[in-house]
Amino acid sequence: MKSIVIRGGEVVDASGSRRADVLVEDGRIAAVADDGSSLAADVELDAGGCVVAPGLVDLHAHLRQPGKEEAETVETGARAAALGGFTCVLAMPNTTPAIDSAGVAREVLELGRRACCEVRAAGAITVGRAGTQLAPMAELADLGVRFFTDDGDGVQDGRLMRRALEYARGLGVTLAQHCEDTVLSAGGAMNEGATSARLGIPGQPAEAEEVMVLRDVALARLTGGRVHFQHLSTRRSVAMVAAAKAEGLPVTCEATPHHLALTDERCASYDPVFKVNPPLRTADDVAAVRAGLADGTIDCIATDHAPHAPETKEQPFDEAPPGMLGLETALAVALTHLELPIAGVLALLSWRPAAVIGAADAHGVVAQGRPAHLCVVDPTASWTVEPERLASRSRNTPYAGMTLTGRVRHTVYAGEAVVVDAEAQR
Amino acid sequence: MRHLLGIADLSADDIDHLLVLADSFAEVGRRRMPKVPALQGRTVTWLFYEDSTRTRLSFEQAAKRLSADTLSFSVSTSSVRKGESLRDTVETIEAMGVDCIVVRHRSAGVPHQIARWVSASVVNAGDGWHEHPTQALLDCYTIREHLGGLDGLRIAIVGDVKHSRVARSDAWAFTTMGAEVTLVAPPTLLPPSTEGWPVRVSHDIDATLGEVDVVYLLRMQQERMTEALIPSLREYTACYGLTRRRVDQLGEKAIVMHPGPMNRGVEIAADVADLPRSVVIDQVRNGVAVRMAVLFELLGSGRREGDR
């Protein structure tokens, strides 16, 4: 394996910021030196004007394999991730079949071993994500699965969710919830409110999300099980999690780049590329999500990268599947829209999500001896999102034609330069 | 004008222009030979994903009176049933050479999507709960015919506003033309928000009728009961139906309108539907002239190949 030296950058991680060069050898960080002139390596990566950060960690990626390979594969999704600066993604279990057994989990993990970032798998809470019978969580935990979710379908049955949390507590694993009361949200294709009323698109109220956040905060209190709230999108959801944390309950949460950047007004184009679940909300909700990210209520940014083949988004708005691409744009969207110092944005995308899934031993630190998972970010580079140029198999980015500030220049995964000068190397 | 996607895109001048144009086509309709060669060589296609009798026939009559060729697309026997995407369907139809696509779909926004994909003109003949602009234009035309104009009129739109594309288009059109609009319905049949709508809202039809020049009744659908939006049609009729007793509260010149098809005995009593002040048949008649005006505006002498 070729050694790499990353020269001229500002190293930023949880311990702070310093001018340093980084030497990578045999998959590990061999040296972090403030005067790196003596460091020599096979490959030189220029980091002038850039931040050298730990690789980013995404807790919420739909890689679509097995089952929907026309939309994405582990290979293409991981390439998109690497281009976005991610060195670790958590693959969601809503594949076909679902990741609800050791066999499917092994298949995904095996595909991940050849990919250009680390691929971890989340397991389903219930068999087939059908919400009726617990999936074999212990069997999955034996394979290293630490995160369980029926993502896309929140567990509707409160008693089942209670039992799942109790069982999960015994295994020391976390349950992640897509919070949506599907009776209240039934038929809704966008956020319910003034915009949906004007557009004539059936809406789903913010309360459909909030009642399940409320219930699962209560169940975390009842069971002591750890709950991670996925893609929070409303002001009151953020407030409820803040209150739960203040109470000392074992809860964490995430928000997506699109919920911090876009409002439901985007749906006025009737372009299903703006259809997502939870739906884009109001400007007030966006402000609350940004505030929650700034004050630490929201632990991390997770992409909810959800590829869909183009023909599925060329359907009527209310018939098209929800979901948007996110891996290649997440960091730039956060840097463009959050008024946080870059270390704050990197915390939300790297070391804090790593801590949430118990991956902090491998990800989130730039230090001698650690695995070499790094990204080099040019925080001032501006670029325009061109869907045809994305590495994902799908094209459903809501940022097409938008100019964003901040771009990943290089990504190093396990000591290999997988992205150099914003180009994937394999 | 390239497309007619919604009333929300139109100014008062735009609407007025179309109504004046419709006057001249209404005159054509009264001739012994009610046909002009204005759209000879032009092809109009109907893309109706939802059942419709009167709108479809009205557009067809309008196109034929303008001498346009028409092509019909029947969803039930088409490849749509075989899972073809909306875009593929539309591009296939356009490739056959059409100048105008008149589309009705159960989903809001479909005409807007189609307009982005094709170079033909697109006319929205009703999209989900969103808009039905030619209905609003013919309603404006009919009100103008009976009451001289819309400026300063007070109009009540009564019934299932929430699910009604007619109510949205009418509310925009009537207020754009200077009328005051009150939406009258139980809260369950109103949109989740009327923030930004230039209308008043009432839940009391009896408090409204005495002050209005036009009562516009919306069709009440049977399935609203199963969605728990109203307890029963009987209760709806008792609270919001235009009964004979309620009609007597109306001013002498006030007119009663309905987009059809009517549920006699539900939103409108049978004998009220047949009163002289009920102008439902005029609405249907005027629909042809108004749709001729729309097709002519989009495809007629003002627009030739160079415009594309």
Image (cartoon, helix red, strand yellow):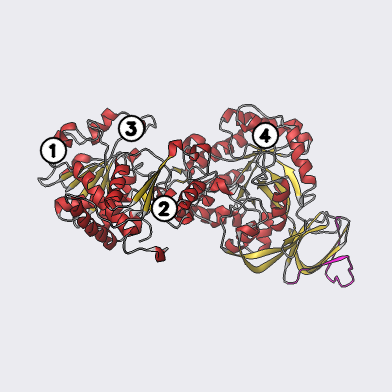
Q: Label 3 sits on what residue type?
A: Ile
Q: Where on the picture, by quarter, is residue A98?
A: top right
Callout 4 crowding tier (Cα within 10 Å): few <14, some 14–19, many ≥20 = some
Q: Residue at x 54, y 38 (%)?
A: A212
Residue A42 within the magenta-colored segment of the rendering: yes
The chain under label 3 reads B
The chain under label 2 reads B
Distance from label 4 to label 1 (Cα)?
A: 63 Å
Q: Earlier in the sequence, mark 3 or mark 1?
A: 3
Residue A82 within the magenta-colored segment of the rendering: no
List the residue tagged with mark 2: B98
Q: Secondary structure at mark 1?
A: loop
Distance from label 3 to label 1 (Cα)?
A: 28 Å
**Labels 2, 4: one chain:** no
List the residue tagged with mark 4: A97
Are circles 3 and 2 on residues that touch, CB within 8 Å?
A: no
**Labels 4, 3: one chain:** no
Can residue A85 be seen at all in this image of the molecule? Answer: no
List the residue tagged with mark 1: B275
Distance from label 3 to label 2 (Cα)?
A: 44 Å
Q: Could you say where residue A96 lies in the image, as x and y percent from the top left?
A: 66, 36
Which residues, given as a range, are shown in magenta?
A: A27-48
Q: Secondary structure at mark 3?
A: loop
Distance from label 1 to label 2 (Cα)?
A: 43 Å
List the residue tagged with mark 3: B230
Q: Could you say where residue B291 lies in the image, as x and y percent from the top left?
A: 28, 51
Q: Label 1 sits on what residue type?
A: Leu
* A326 relative position to B95: left or right: right
